[in-house]
Image (cartoon, rainbow, N blue to C red):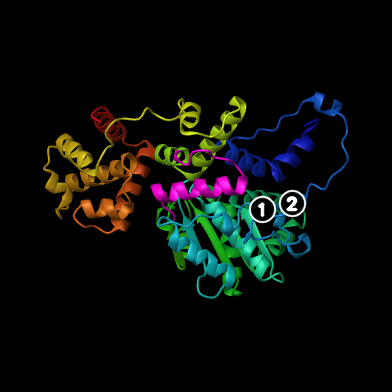
Amino acid sequence: MPNDFAREWIERRLAGQVAEALADVLGDTIEVRVVVDARAAELPDKPAEPIEEPPVEVPSAPPAGRRQPAKPGRRSSSAADLNPRYVFDRFVTGPNNEYATAVARSVAESPATAYNPVFIYADTGLGKTHLIQAIAHDALDQHPHLSVRYVTCERFTDDFISAVTDRGGIDGFKQKYRDNDVLIVDDVQFLADKQQTQVEFFHTFNALYEAGKQIVITSDRPPRELEELDDRLRSRFGQGVVVDISRPDLETRIAILRKQVKWEGYHVAEPEALEWIAQKITTNIRELYGALTRVVGFASIRGSDVTLEITREALKDIVPKAYEHPVTIEMVQNEVARQFGLHVNDLRGNRRTQDIVYARHIAMYLARELTEASLPKIGDRFGGRHHTTVIHGVDKIERQLKDGHDPQLQDLVTLISGRLKSSR
């Protein structure tokens, strides 16, 4: 940008959308940095276009059954923040998100009736933002008279800071966020360490809830684990419906890729190529999309169809080499039991001493990371436990690995993973 004013304007209004669009294409988290450079002023002028409400480009003949974006006149003031791709028709439902999708559709159909508030949590790249923006799109399509606002937690915080620093701005801020029939806030965990913003969010939440308005919130953790937030906020978040989205299984990942191919109009000569991608990319949906985009681009440069051979070559630098025998749950249990000096039956049984529970959680985490087994199947192999018990164990180990307070755990997981992979 040519000056600080332009830089700040772009950072405040568009940087988040640019980062999200790049992440969707590249399959990775992208940091957007806007810098001041005098050379920007020398660029040729272009015809002025509306920035606040950019036009949405819609194909002239969309596939049958595809929901058309509603006309701009029917949108709320937050419509420019919605991705036109994030609709229910493009969201693949599987065992990992079936309940969350049912709740989301119900909210869009009848806001503030059966489910309110709604709290959706999941790891990065598993479809939280897609699902809640689909709620906004669908609610506006079905109820054009409603005021629906989608906002990221970062945008809410920026708006609050601006309101505090501007004379009379706080009244406009309250009107902006409290005069909505549906308020959707993404990534509420970023309220951590922002005490004044938490207080304002608490009052906004209460005002909407007491007025019978719909509230939808997302986070990367369930309410009880948002320890950086005030207790009264966590209590409010947990008083409604709390649903999670877990990682998709192999069948769902294949379905996701097939739908993406259909929507983007890609030509895939060998369907086995999609199955191969789904087998190798297991972390999240964003990386799945990134891998597919890379393969299609690579094939285009080579002047080739998308085949299994081309796919392997395109992803050889980002996908580990295939091993002859896959890791099984039993292999994980045997190796973990060996490392802890336990018997495999200790991991599968009901004993709950501290060392056994710790080892059992690590085994569940590694079974989820290194095998293609579904959560119910993992639970079944650990003594018939419910899949929510597996989720609890996996989440607990993931949090401990992320916070870095237990370096021995990281070393242990790395050691066991290495042994299992080398034995394949």
In the rendered view, does 402 fall on the left or right side of 39? Answer: left
In the rendered view, does 362 fall on the left or right side of 234? Answer: left
402 up-or-down from 89: above or below: above
Q: Residue at x 55, y 62 (%)?
A: 216
Q: Residue at x 75, y 36 (%)?
A: 7
> Label 2's element?
loop
- Tell me the crowding category of disc 1: few under 14, some 14 to 19, or many 20 or more residues within 10 angstroms, Cα based: some
Residue 310 in the image: state x and y as whole percent.
50, 29
Q: Mark on residue 201?
A: none
Q: Residue at x 65, y 70 (%)?
A: 142
Residue at image mark 2: 56
Q: Nearer the viewer, residue 74 or 326?
A: 326
* Residue 138 placement: quadrant: bottom right
> Label 1's element?
loop
Kindly report the distance in space between the C-alpha atoms of the residues bearing marks 1 and 2: 7 Å
Q: Which quadrant does the C terminus fall into?
A: top left
Judge whether residue 259 is colored magenta: yes
Residue at image mark 1: 84
Q: Which quadrant does the N terminus fall into?
A: top right
Q: Which residues are magenta?
A: 245-272
Three-letter code, disc 2: Val
* Residue 98 placement: quadrant: bottom left
Residue 354 in the image: state x and y as whole percent.
19, 47
Q: Which badge, 1 or 2, is on the more N-terminal residue?
A: 2
408 up-or-down from 85: above or below: above
